[in-house]
Amino acid sequence: MGEMTDIEGNTAAAPGALTVSVFGRYGRELHRYLARRLRRPADADDLAQEVYLRLLRRNRDEAVANPRAYVYRIASHVVSEFQSRTAHGEDHVTFSSEAVEHLDRHPPEVASEDELAERLHLQREIQQALSQLPPTHQAIFLLHKRDGHSHEEIARKLEVSMHTVEKYLVQAKARLRAMTWDR
Amino acid sequence: MGSIMREEDGLRIAERAAYWHMALNRGGARRAGEVELAQFMSWLEESPLHVREFLLQQAWEIQTNGIDGQRRIDVDALLARGAGNILPLPQSAPVAGPHLPVRDAVPAIPGRHSPHAHSSAHAARRQPGRWRWAAAAVATIGTLAVISWQLLSGQTYSTTFGELRTVELTDGSTIQLSTRSTVKVAFSGEAREISLLAGEALFDVAPDATRPFRVHAGQHVIQAVGTQFTVNRRPLGTVVSVVQGAVRVLPEASAAGSGADTLLSAGEEVIVEPDGRLQRREPVQNIEMVAWRERRLVFRDDALADIAAEFNRYNRGTQIMVEGETARNKRYGGIFDADDPEAIVRFVAQDPALTIRREGERIVIR
């Protein structure tokens, strides 16, 4: 499948495709920032607190047509502010909401070696954790995430409802995340 | 933020984050509509932890693309092993509405870090809990509608059956939430307003002379004077117990110092009855006031209706109903294990004036 995936990989992700397209081309710094904190979620508290406060400051009447893009945009701003405050501040990044809207059209981006190593490390840990889930959870997670089957396709294959597939997926993902948290 | 967060809470929030991630990615006819988008925003606005998990979930999704790239894991073999274990859930149940955490409607997963293993086993044994949960959610919404001003702002913290939770507030105060309890926190430059919407909580108040700390419970307000105290909203009245320092209890509509307030100091306890009268109780041992933190329930001359409600907050399965005014107002004392509702039933069974009837998981005393 030549096109890029949607955010979740509902269309098939080219295996190993290193994409951060969901945050937009300019949300790359945000993704880097978050990826480094996946195993220690508490390290992302500062970012979350700041994004949260800005969300609350929003005028309540202000309609947000695309809340997800809105949150990412705020988060990208905050991360770039954090970085400009540090001595090793990387380039400023701005967020393009258009990038979120058209995320399927963005080409995969090449990650640095560090990022690649980080990702492989996480994936090894997740594979380990995966083997501890019940078989059906493992299977549904892999069918979706690895083989790129849609929820609907999985539901048909297993002869269950789409709701059921979604429940299994949500549970599998949350468990896998929690099992790879450092403590 | 979140330093005292329990692993269980972390998992639950991770599930919500994964759920929202999925819901916002649905396309076509199932694309998230206005209502869902608004629910998503409300969820984010509930807590910075939600924001954090949502952002991290997104990064996680990307980082896990390409997992098992060499396809070493045999999905068909997994499916064969798991055959018959898929539990199709009723179509009518929403995947995870905002008031129905995902974990309530899905089979439990045993795992390495499985804080739920115990409570989920409970839940599985006592299946009908799901519908009661929905009923509880509806009941909570009813309460919220009554106390409308509290909806205007603030952040809500809740616990479910059997769950205890500590919430750290930005001013350094903490709230320890008992099981099935809900508080709403609204801090401003002028005041620290908390609403106890359901259940019981222990408040440990950080001193701040410029911003009074007030707990609203039904028709009354409990104002802290640098202190530690618990408030418990029971069916037959709200119990206020002071562990340290002092509090003022006053009706919602009146001001402190207007003469309408009652000052309580350490060791004192009052019941605010539904008609607004305050009834003082015998002085208590501090340890008894907060025994629920060790999952012990201490009763001293308490009405059976209140005792049953207390047990029901801890136990999703067995629910004790007390019918008839005589039975509801019978008074008992004792120390009980919160997880053993049968103990109170055995205790009450000794009273010849009462009859006990079992209807499935309901125990009806009258």
Image: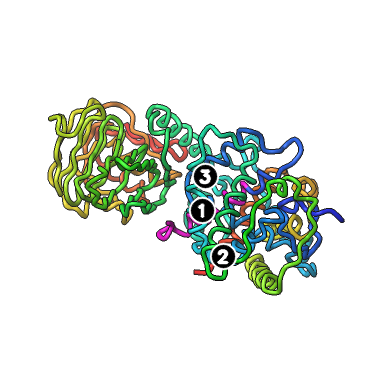
Q: What is the three-letter code of the residue carrying label 3?
A: Leu
Q: Is residue A55 above or below residue B114?
A: above
Residue at the spot of label 1:
B120
Q: Which chain carries label 3?
A: A
- Secondary structure mostly seen in magenta is helix
Q: Mark 2 lies on which chain?
A: A
In the picture, measured across the screen, residue A64 lies left or right of residue B273, that is right
In the picture, measured across the screen, residue B19 lies left or right of residue A9, that is left
Please, which residue is most extreme toward the right here? A2
| Dot 2: element | loop
| Dot 1: element | helix
Looking at the rendering, the stretch of residues picked out in magenta corresponds to B1-20
Residues packed near mark 2 inside 10 Å, few (<14), some (14 to 19) or many (20 plus): some
Respond whether the residues carrying marks 2 and 3 are from the same subunit. Answer: yes
Residue B127 in view of the camera? no
Q: Which of A1 and B187 is in front in this view?
A: B187
Residue sitting at x 56%, y 38%: B39
Residue at the spot of label 2:
A37
Residue at the spot of label 3:
A55
Residues packed near mark 3 inside 10 Å, few (<14), some (14 to 19) or many (20 plus): some
For the N terminus of chain B, the quadrant is bottom left
